[in-house]
Image (cartoon, rainbow, N blue to C red):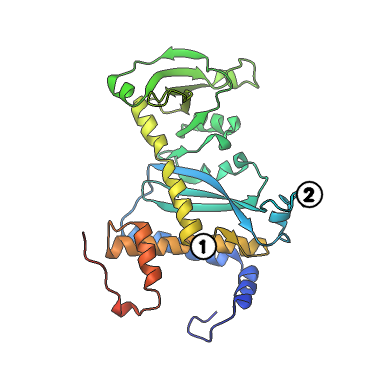
Amino acid sequence: VNPFGDPISRAQAYKINNHTNPKMLGDIFHKIRKSIQSKHQIKRGIVTAIDSTFVASRSITCPLVTKGYNPSKAKRRTGIKAHLVMDLTNRLPERIAIGSGKQADATTLNLLNALGKETVRVFDRGYRQYKTFIKYIEANEWFVTPRVMDSMPNAIVDFEITQNDLDHDVIADQLCYLSSQRNTRGYSKYQIRCVMLLHRNDPDCKPQVLMTNMMNISATEVVEIYNQRCLIEVDIHHLKQLLGISKLGAYSEHGILNQWIIALICYLLIWLFERTHYQGFGFWKAAKFIRYNITETWYSLELPAPT
């Protein structure tokens, strides 16, 4: 579509979007991201997280949507599930995958396979998959994830707890078996580190156990790495609310994926604008500033004075 040509209607835009190959927009996304990395000398961050979000859809004719559609519950929301991989150190998106609303999160954990050994993979309990954990342990690829508290882990060795760990609500640091049951598909022969937390300010809070295969850092650092996972929740909120993909209007798999890729491209452009022209302004304010001034020419844009 020629951006300098005659404007097209919304119906024509939806038609073009649904029939455009996502590979074309995906190549644009990767080129912009590669350009940002080269110009700003950005290396891949230490902490990378994956999380999913449910996105409602106006159409039930798309195969991804109909897989999660129940005619007896037509009043409930129908849509797709998007899985986003974010570089939390640089706050840059890495990958995106879409699936049906009923798809299990653990089936998309392979999106983290190409990150390298120097990256710490952080994900919540929805992505728990012991086969992947064993693969990470054998390949010495780092990860941090909560342990489901169906039973207490079987401790092998108790590590020393420092005062700094106690100040961060760490009550135990142990070397445990991967599975609490000794004869569960051979998982018991694998060992993993478990850091147990108990928030003393909340008397009703239950203990939380974090699993990791990193043995050369303190328990406090394990907790701080996992606490960075909340940043991906903020980034997903920005994508859904600021960039307008809280409800999908596409009726094909190509259209749904294209909407997400376009949102990620806009995210990169806003990130580049904020880092280049007004670093420290914040993504939210930068996006609002561009939205309010989008009808003006770029020659007349005036940045606000720093506070």
Vertical order, 223 against 260 (above or below) = above
Give the mark nearest the N terminus, 2 or 1: 2
Which numbered marker is on residue 98?
A: none
On screen, residue 63 versus residue 270, left or right, reads right
Nearer the observer, disc 2 or disc 1? 2
- Please tell me how crowded label 2 is: few (under 14), some (14-19), or many (20+) other residues with Cα within 10 Å: few
Disc 2 + disc 1, Cβ < 8 Å? no
Q: Which residue is mark 1?
A: 244
Q: Is residue 217 visible?
A: no
On screen, residue 306 versus residue 134, left or right, reads left
Name the residue: 40% across, 25% down: 199
Q: Secondary structure at mark 2?
A: helix
Q: CA distance from mark 2 to mark 1?
A: 29 Å
Q: Nearer the viewer, residue 294 or 76?
A: 76
- Please tell me how crowded label 1 is: few (under 14), some (14-19), or many (20+) other residues with Cα within 10 Å: few
| Residue 230 percent coordinates (x, y) | 43, 42
Q: Secondary structure at mark 1?
A: loop
Q: Amino acid at mark 1?
A: Gly
Vertical order, 76 against 216 (above or below) = below
Vertical order, 185 against 300 (above or below) = above
Q: Nearer the viewer, residue 189 or 297?
A: 297
Q: Which residue is mark 2?
A: 72
On screen, residue 164 versus residue 110, left or right, reads left
Q: Quadrant of the C terminus?
A: bottom left
| Residue 118 percent coordinates (x, y) | 40, 39
Q: Quadrant of the N terminus?
A: bottom right
| Residue 37 percent coordinates (x, y) | 36, 57
